[in-house]
Amino acid sequence: MTRAWILPILLVLCGSVVAAGLIFSGIPGAAAAILPLFVALAGVNSPLAFPRPIGALEAQRRSAVDGRPVVFWRSGCKYCLRLRIRLGRSARQAHWVDIWRDPAGAAVVRAANEGNETVPTVVVAGRPHVNPDPEWVRGQLPPSV
């Protein structure tokens, strides 16, 4: 769980150092613009940008019942972020598994990717798809009501 927060924490710390340097240099306006940018980058790269993750076993059980895809992801992954952003609100319809929080999820991803933890890996009807097109994933989601 700690690994997921390393990048966001580093981004906030770096932004704070840069902003402090700009303030001491007499450029507080630039500091006021830079710090929120770093905080926004930290937020986008944090687990907060994704739907609440569940365990792999629970996600697979739910998927077997409702037919929704299971998305295996990790924070800091630009491809996972791209998928999350492109899915928009419909991302909540998938079951999300953070492989850094769930060892069983990481094992599922390694089994599907020849031992590598390549994410996003989307499992639909028991078949894994590595880094699929977001529009294809959207097509696998149930229609919104």
Image (cartoon, helix red, strand yellow):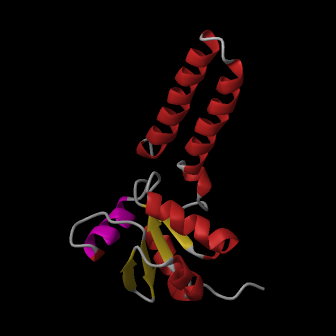
Work out whether residue 54 can be spotted. Answer: no
Magenta part of the protein: which range? Answer: 103-111
Residue at horizontal 58%, vertical 75%? 94
Which residue extends farthest left? 114
Q: In the picture, residue 103 is in which quadrant?
A: bottom left
Please name whichever residue, 109 or 85, is drawn nearer the observer in this view of the structure: 85
Q: Is residue 105 magenta?
A: yes
Please name whichever residue, 99 or 137, is drawn nearer the observer in this view of the structure: 137
x, y percentage for residue 79?
Answer: 45, 63
Q: In the picture, residue 130 is in which quadrant?
A: bottom left
x, y percentage for residue 99?
Answer: 40, 60
Q: Is 137 positioned to the left or the right of 56 in the image?
A: right
Q: Is residue 12 magenta?
A: no
x, y percentage for residue 126?
Answer: 40, 86
Residue at horizontal 56%, vertical 29%? 15
Q: In the picture, residue 92 is in which quadrant?
A: bottom right
Q: Is 24 positioned to the left or the right of 72 in the image?
A: right
x, y percentage for residue 95?
Answer: 55, 72
Residue at horizontal 43%, vertical 80%? 123
Work out whether residue 37 can be spotted. Answer: yes
